Image: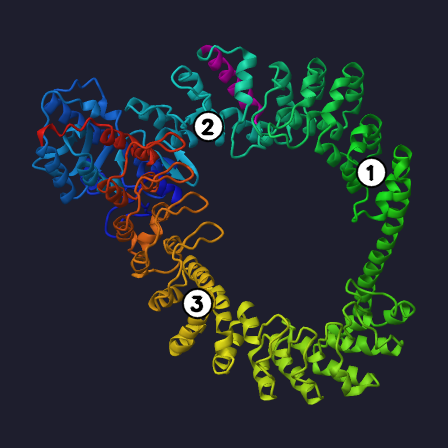
Amino acid sequence: MEAEEALFGFGLFDDFPEGELHPLQIDVFEDENENSNQRTKINIYRPVKEGTELHRAIRSGRQVRIDALLDTYQLDFMKIKDYLVLKYQWDPEDHIWLRKVNLVAVNEDQCRSVKDLERNREADGRVSLERSMFVLLQTPVDGEEVAVLHPEYYDNLELFKALWKLFPNGYLSWDNFMEDHGRWETFIEAAAGCGNNYTIKRLLSMGAQLCLPQHNPLLSACSSLRKDTIRFLLDNYFDDFDFTQRKNFMNAFIILIQRNNIELLDYVLEKMIQYRGKYYGESKSQAFNSIFRFEDDDCPYFSTLTYLRPGKVQKRIEEYIVEFELDLSYRRENASIVLAQLLRKKLALEYCRAQIRRNPELLGMMRHDGNGPTILHECISCDELELLNDMYMIHPEVKQNFNHEYGFILFREALDNHRNDRVQFMLKYHKDFLWSNMERLQIVIFNRNNIEAFYEWNETILSEHLPELKGQIEDAIVTAHELQIVNDLEKEFKEITEKIKGNLQNVSQYQHILSSIRGPSGESALHFAVENDNLQLFEKLIQVECDLNVSDNEGNHPIHYVRSVDMLNLIIESHPQGRSLVNRVNSAGWSVLQKVCSHYATSTNTLIQLVGTLIEYGADVNHLTKSGETAAFMTWSVPVLEMLMNHGINLNVVNDSGETAVLRHLWYQNTWVARILLPLAWDHPSFEENAHKYLAPLLKTKRYAFDYYRSLLDDNPDKTKKMLDAVYQRSPEEASRLFASACDRTRLFYVQKFLEYNYELDFNYRDQYGYTPIMGLLNFNKERPGDLIRQLLEKNVDLEIRNQWNQTPLLIIASRFASARRYDQGISTVELLLQHGAQINEVDESGNTALHLAFKSSEWELVELLIQNGADLTTTNNDGKRPWESGPCAIRDIFRLIWSSNNANVGF
């Protein structure tokens, strides 16, 4: 949808307003007069989802409807013709109306306004219709259905203000195109894609252009494999359009490669080569190379070969490459090299080898930025070792093309993939280079993730060629073996626990190893049984005398894994310490109660029962971990928290990091628990001392969750002010940072409070991306800032500060104007910025001014405002475009006529 709006400058509609007849709903009327009357009641040029009504009709394949719409177009063109002939004595053989994008006025107000504009600036005999604009009036004014406007007789802005309101009506033009699901199609392109040769001929007979820049009907026909249309176009119109041109970097040859159709591929390629020979003066080889290349800077790793599918076409491409002598030395900046892709795909290998032998410099080809492999690296990777052996003998200088960082990567890949032939080759010819960077070589050979099999594969060859590293290799083998043992034990643990979980009879079978196997965290089979709440398995493991005091790597006893009251009771009954076991702690000092409270996966009811039982059995609710935390820090459940509170848990404990339980839950966004703890913290004597700590996590709260805090903050304005006061008094700089964060995240409640309390903040504070508070508010992110923008602007805000994308506040709102407009704060906000000194002609990193951005996003009201306030219409961006040249393609010619006119104002 955004692309559609960017192209045409207004919102698109799937259907017409309720009550208005749609062209495709028109029946084939028996009475032609009735049919004509119906058509005049509607605007067939208004954009719809598929483009225009004519686009929709062509794609529907309903020829009666297509012809009816074409007749209407023709009638409307004739209205303009007749008007020009009558009023300007224009030569009827000069079809100027077909060369223009003609605007459309629909209702009486629009039509009368345009007609008045024409009459108020009647031109004299010197006027040039080539530089004039034609408007079709669907509601006649004093019997006239056309108006002609001469830009040089109007103030530019006056004319623009009158015309932009017509843009949503669409345009009368045979060259009308619109994006439809990623396609920009003219009417002829749409017809070609549907194989409708009759409509193509009719459109051409009516004056439509066969081909426009970036609009090649042959591509549409090829995309849908319309064989008859392909031959129809090339046999009948070979000399009438450049069918070798591309659209979005694709040409007919590349499209047909994807379609895997050899017959059409041969035919079209032959025609394309003939055309380029005739009109570009290229040889067959030159023409093929031009056709074969794919140059999309946004997809540097793509080439024509990227689109090649397995099948018969693949063999034919090899034949083309040889027959037309593909230039293997060609490369684009920082893009894939075709020779490398040919080697990887094993295509035309004999041709590639012959070219390399003929031109040894090909082996040194690599991306312009120096990253990635050379062709020599590719040859090794693609097992062209015999070729390289020959090249090294004849041209030993080419060996230096191995000496890049990628050489180490290639060496590592060969070792990993057990490709001793490649390893042998590299050590034979390139050992000196590898050895020259010992640190890099050791990283390759002695990677800590190397498994035992890595050295089993490579020990002999490495020791033979690198005897200096033999001792280190032997040590690495020992380390890898030890790691393998651990991995094997973990794998064995997983296999055995799954077997005994599924069938308790297997416990006896594995009894001899159940006490020794361990999981990834050092857990035993008993830990596994407890964690899975498998009481029968636990009992069976106790029967085979598994050690009930075993701990995992973090010192957790099996009871720390408990998930139910039944399992808790079973463990206590099975252990000599009985209920005192509930106060067992792990290496970090966590008690069983604290571990249980931290379990997110346990259901609430089960968790409440389990916590209650632990407390009943003597668990200390105020036990502190080694980091000074109680269970209140761990629980995620409100009922559990309330139970702990009922048993006297101390909620004011401060851990070793200076954090309280409420701060923990605020930072972790555990909203329901934090909402209970926050009012309690407010009522504690230490609140004022710690008040500054609460604001930052509250600002991090997700938007939907903040609503749960909002009522608390509104009901306790004194506490809210204390928090902000505490932050400001402790550090004005931190208060400024938090204010900027509130603006950036559109947390308007806090923005309002900061401004209301009138702190002396740094209102030009810049975050890590260079954003200031005013820039944050101008994001219009989810909420309407209302009067806050004005209040902030009164704080001596610097509107010339730029973020890391070189945007000023004005440029930011211009780039996101649609969001501001949705909140009905677009124009008014820009006016505020300008009133407070925003410079209107500043540019961003792409060289765009606010006016460029307004034209680009088709924000016509903003365009009008900016020009009224002195925006420069001549500034060019990094692409060399003036602001109006960034506007929608379909009406760019209208802008050219308005903004390029001499505008002498002719005495007015």
Residue 31 in view in this figure: no
Q: Nearer the viewer, residue 489 or 402?
A: 402
The percent coordinates of residue 542 (x first, y second) are: 85, 78
Quadrant of the rendered image containing residue 848: top left
Residue type beneath disc 1: His
Label 1 neighbourhood size at 10 Å, few (<14), some (14-19), many (20+)? some
Find numbered disc 1 in the image and state the secondary structure of the residue it sits on: loop
Residue type beneath disc 2: Leu
**Label ID, residue 728:** 3
Mark 1 highlights which residue? Answer: 418
Label 3 neighbourhood size at 10 Å, few (<14), some (14-19), many (20+)? many
**Earlier residue among tags 3 and 2:** 2
Q: Nearer the viewer, residue 775 or 296?
A: 775
Q: Nearer the viewer, mark 1 or mark 3?
A: 3
Mark 2 highlights which residue? Answer: 219
Quadrant where the image shows the C terminus: top left
**Is 275 a magenta residue?**
yes
Q: Nearer the viewer, residue 276 or 25?
A: 276
The percent coordinates of residue 525 (x first, y second) are: 82, 70
Secondary structure mostly seen in magenta is helix
Q: Nearer the viewer, mark 2 or mark 1?
A: 1
Q: CA distance from mark 2 to mark 1?
A: 47 Å
So how many labels did they put on this image?
Answer: 3
Quadrant of the rendered image containing residue 565: bottom right
Q: Which residues are magenta?
A: 261-278
Q: Is residue 731 left or right of residue 865?
A: right
Is the residue under label 1 in contact with that under label 2 (CB below 8 Å)? no
